Amino acid sequence: MTDITPSILDVPSQPAKVRRRGLNKLSGLRNVLVGLRRAWLARMWGMDLHPTVQMSLSAKLDRTFPIGVHVGEYSYLAFESRILTHDRTRGLYLHTRIGRNCFIGGRSMIMPGVEIGDNCVVGAGSVVTKSIPANSVVAGNPARILHSNIDVGPYGRFSTADAMEDALARSGQA
């Protein structure tokens, strides 16, 4: 006897675009929550967060010395990233600054007193212990400069990423 029911393996999976569209329906709610959290941190805690800053809801900003947190426009703080402004063991309370168009990777830690220049990308899991010059890619523990003179757009997105995404969409692979 032949089984005529289709196998799960025979059914083509939904295109990535269809799956993405379903998740994007929730992006409006997420944007509202992120905006409310950003406004709450800025108004209630006195943090210097530009209105265009995007952050994961799990990103942690130090509230021990909240006026020491400075994040520039069009920067992105990924999941579980941490920005510290104090060191209780040495009694230090320092300003920590992140420039414009920066991307701070998931589970990265920015130590107190560090200044990250404009247009920088911090790799996931990095521990940034020293200031980073503008237009750099850093990663590691402690973070080291991997590339300099990079060209990034808003939220630390590489300009070549948009071109690659467009090419994949035209070829039907995205």
Image (cartoon, rainbow, N blue to C red):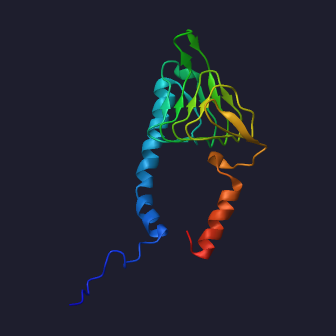
The single residue placed furthest to the bottom in the displayed view is 1
Residue 91 at x, y percent in the picture:
55, 9
**Residue at point 46% right, 26% down?**
44
Residue plotted at (61% across, 69% down): 168
> Residue 12 is drawn in which quadrant?
bottom left
Depth check, front residue: 126 or 78 = 126
Residue 166 position in % (x across, y down): 64, 67
- List the single residue furthest toward the front: 1
Q: Residue 61: percent from the left, percent from the top? A: 50, 29
Q: Residue furthest right?
A: 149
Quadrant containing the N terminus in the rendered view: bottom left
Is residue 76 visible from the viewing direction of this image? no
Q: Quadrant of the C terminus?
A: bottom right
Count the marks. Answer: 0
Residue 152 in picture, x, y percent from top left: 70, 48
Does residue 123 appear in the picture of this structure?
yes
- 12 w.r.t. 96: above or below: below
In the image, 6: left or right of 36?
left
Q: Quadrant of residue 104?
A: top right
> What residue do we see at 37% from left, 78% from top?
11
Q: Give me the residue at 70% from left, 58% from top.
A: 160
Nearest the viewer among 100 and 123 is 123
